[in-house]
Amino acid sequence: MENDKSLRNWLNTMNLAHPLVIAGPCSAETEEQVLKIAHQLKETDTTVLRAGIWKPRTRPGNFEGVGALGLKWLQKAKQETGMMIATEVANANHVDLALKHDVDILWVGARTTVSPFIVQEIAEALKGSDKIVLIKNPVNPDLALWLGAVERFYESDVKNLGVIHRGFSTYEKTRYRNNPEWQIPIDLQNKFPDLPLILDPSHIAGRRDIIFDLCQTALDLNYDGLMVETHYDPDNAWSDADQQITPKTLDQMTVDLKIRKQEGDEVEFKNKLSTLRTKIDVLDHQLIESLGKRMKIADDIGKLKKKNNVAILQTKRWNEILEKMILEGEENKLSEEFILRIFKAIHQESINHQKKVIND
């Protein structure tokens, strides 16, 4: 599907001197809470006030939002501060209520993006609308699902679209609540280069102490904005307390964040960059050649195992490789997380090669 420049129009018309900042509480709790946060955020670089109204939780029994009543509080905050307002919608009824309360930006949550049926329902409810719609990545690292959601809205003539990167669930324990998987949003932007990309560092981090670093990484990768959960009393928030920051912290963070130039202007810079990139190209070529040679050896191992009726997976050998590579990775300033990810992929490819040989 071809891109349409109108995908970026809504952001360009704001004419902001900085990346877009969307901020507000994870959940609207009370009218007083929403208005207090809104007025505090008005004194920052925040352009859009966000708040969850309907909050489907992973397990029942937790606070699941105040419902439609909270839309009146958001509407009042908009009238008092002049900020745009945003909330999550998960079905056609939510869309109808949000539109009736003059919500400016609707976002589709990660749990919703996984279902083409629900995405289609929401897209049809917004057919031909000029409202801004932001689509969060699906819970699992599935680029096709994310792309499919964008395409469904595009086909419903909803062109004021953007996407929100909020990280991906993983069964492996990492320092993040949801692993960033930065390559996936990069791949999405390769498909839709005019699609505004917003980072949700709160849901990636799961804790407030690494939100700044995530935001800086996003700006270094040319993201268009940030959606940060903020609360005047984060520790006592009714949902996701650990990942919310105060408006004051947000204000300081936006001052401290560095916005890089997309390209250097100096000839010397460009020449040096070209030289370094050439070195990377050479090493990448050598890396692919080495992996190809490794897989040929895996094929030979598969033939030997087939001849001797030996199982493909040798757990002891695999654990020895991992331990050795983690240590060598540390010596070369490579994180354990990176080494595990790389060698698990290599191991899986080796298994695939051996399976093909044994079953041939």
Image (cartoon, rainbow, N blue to C red):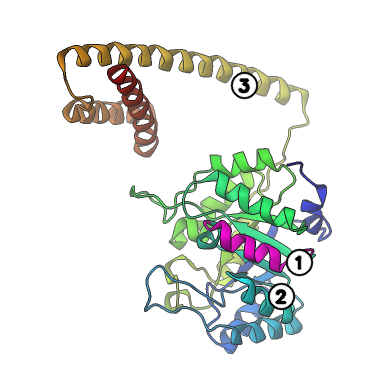
Mark 2 in CB contact with mark 3 (< 8 angstroms)? no
The quarter of the picture where residue 278 lies is top right
Q: Earlier in the sequence, mark 1 or mark 2?
A: 2
Number of marks in the rendered image: 3
Q: Is residue 136 left or right of residue 309?
A: right
Residue at which label 2 appears = 103
**Location of residue 20 with respect to 190 vertically, above or below:** below
Q: Earlier in the sequence, mark 1 or mark 3?
A: 1
Would you say the residues marked 1 and 2 are in contact, meaning their CB atoms lie under 8 Å apart?
Answer: yes
Packing grade of label 3 (10 A; few <14, some 14-19, many >=20) is few
Q: Residue at x 75, y 64 (%)?
A: 127
Crowdedness near tag 1: few (<14), some (14–19) or many (≥20) residues, C-alpha within 10 Å: some
Place of residue 205 in the rendered image (x, y in percent of width and height, measured from the top left): 46, 57
Q: Which mark is residue 131?
A: 1
Q: Which residues are magenta?
A: 114-128
- Secondary structure beneath disc 2? loop
> Which residue type does callout 1 highlight?
Lys
The quadrant where residue 42 appears: bottom right
Mark 2 is on which residue type?
Val
